[in-house]
Image (spheres, coloured by chain):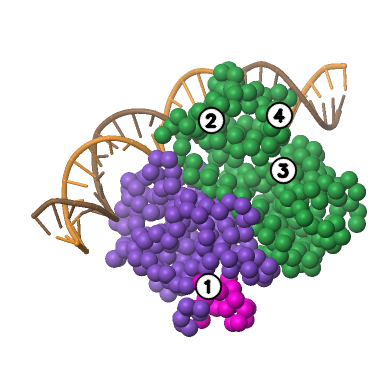
Chain colours: A purple, B green, C brown, D orange
Amino acid sequence: MEISDHDFKKMAQFPLFAGIKPDELLTLLKGSRVRSHSHRGTFVEAGDEASTFGVVLDGAYKLVKPTPKGDDFIMYFATPGDAVGALLMSQEQSVRYPITVKAIGFSRMCVIPKATFNNTWRSHAQILLRINSILYSRMGILQDEKTLARAPLVERIAWFLLKMLERSNSSEEQIIPLPLTRQEIADHLGVTVESVIRIMSQWTQAGIVRSTDGQLEIVRMDQLVQILKDQP
Amino acid sequence: MEISDHDFKKMAQFPLFAGIKPDELLTLLKGSRVRSHSHRGTFVEAGDEASTFGVVLDGAYKLVKPTPKGDDFIMYFATPGDAVGALLMSQEQSVRYPITVKAIGFSRMCVIPKATFNNTWRSHAQILLRINSILYSRMGILQDEKTLARAPLVERIAWFLLKMLERSNSSEEQIIPLPLTRQEIADHLGVTVESVIRIMSQWTQAGIVRSTDGQLEIVRMDQLVQILKDQP
DNA sequence: CGCTCGGTTGATGCACATCAAAGGCTGTGG
DNA sequence: CCACAGCCTTTGATGTGCATCAACCGAGCG
């Protein structure tokens, strides 16, 4: 075990591992180690053989699906406690990552070898249920986004920001805890940067949002909620 | 057990239950029964309490997400062997269906009570892995669709039809085995019927597709593939 | 000091939505 | 058995939200 005590305790807190005894967790993490990535550092590359999966410890990672033309779609933003690539491990065949995983800001990930999944995770009903649960919530997000596909862009951005805020759940300040660029918002929603900027500039001027050193602060959350309600 | 021998054998063939011994399968299906639905018949309604889940036996079901305005998004088409709502069962809280499930044509579904999930499925690692697998493929579809969101509509329809064909996999005739209306294609892709019709009418005239009594036949698959390749 | 990166603004165009109108087909009830 | 309603398909006219292209600015950084 090459994981520090501090990191180990942190992982034990994650919903994924909640209620699992420390010695059991030890076997689940057999052979794993912590890797750190600087901003835009790559954890796994789409198309590579899937020999490991991971659990986010600090920072954030974006799951990017490359398109034929260099469009680069962001499928999901993984934050601490999120599993990355675990779903893939349960597959019998298919051993290539379908997506590229890149760090946003300085981030750390606990990397777990596939062998450990096969040895312990695969037969551990409790943990499989948890993975199911994570998948379920991620699927819900994808579905919601699909539903919003026809909505005007203002609504979709508002919805996205609120969703990101809700996930961070710091309750105090309404600040999205990862340095989101407008390009990333655009890549996630499948629109162009310009369109995102046009809308968010208005919001900045109206005092609804504010960007301070990379972070996005939602000043008037009620206004965003209003935008979502307005269009019946 | 109120399931006919014929249906039981059919279920045993499904990938979901592959390699599971008959007596084991019996306990997994405890308390379940087969329900049939006529065209547009509802299996579960969004918002209802989730007390059962199901496995599709015959025909097909559409998973519909209602929107504030009556837009009705089709999230997924479930065909024989597909699980419906199983993901939901593994959740600790959240006991309401997020989607409405409706039959397309005359269809049959094996309905399994939640209690059975809690008693046997929940601790059965093998079956949980299978559910994971189903989820994974469904998630892949959602992601692919998200990626295509920016592509022109011709491409998206072509991709959708090919995907549906690939799933049926009857290999002989290139016929999509469920009576898809253009409205349903539109509802699935998040566009209007008119747009779908404008494109598919051209295809019909060009002899690429043909609609015979509700079924859709892909006459020139190569042409559809070409459309996908054309746009770089 | 030139470089890349993120943000911003304006002009122009097109793919798809929207609205409208109509015909065929199926099932259903008087 | 016919009339009617609901669903599916089709076509045309008109409008618009967002993409595209182009240009520029400021900040951080090797």
Name the amino acid, label 2. Val
Disc 2 from disc 4: Cα separation: 18 Å
Residue A228 visible somewhere in the drawing: no
Marker disc for residue B225:
2
Magenta: main secondary structure equals helix
Judge if badges 4 and 3 mark residues of a common chain: yes
Residue under label 3, please give it.
Answer: B79
Q: Earlier in the sequence, mark 2 or mark 4?
A: 4
Residue under label 4, please give it.
Answer: B172
Quadrant location, the N terminus of chain B:
bottom right
Quarter where residue B52 is shown:
bottom right
Identity of the residue drawn at 74% across and 47% down: B81
Name the amino acid, label 4. Glu
Q: Do the numbered discs 2 and 4 sit on residues whose CB atoms are within 8 Å? A: no
Marker disc for residue B100:
none
Residue A200 versus residue D29 in the image, above or below:
above
Mark 1 nearby-residue class (10 Å; few <14, some 14–19, many ≥20): some
Q: Is residue A51 magenta?
A: no
Residue A109 visible somewhere in the drawing: yes
Q: Secondary structure at mark 3?
A: loop
Q: Is residue B40 left or right of residue B68?
A: right
Judge if badges 3 and 2 mark residues of a common chain: yes
Magenta segment range?
A9-32
Mark 3 nearby-residue class (10 Å; few <14, some 14–19, many ≥20): many
Residue D23 versus residue A166 in the image, above or below:
above
Q: Is residue B109 left or right of residue D25?
A: right
Q: Chain of mark 3?
A: B
Identity of the residue drawn at 36% across and 49% down: A196
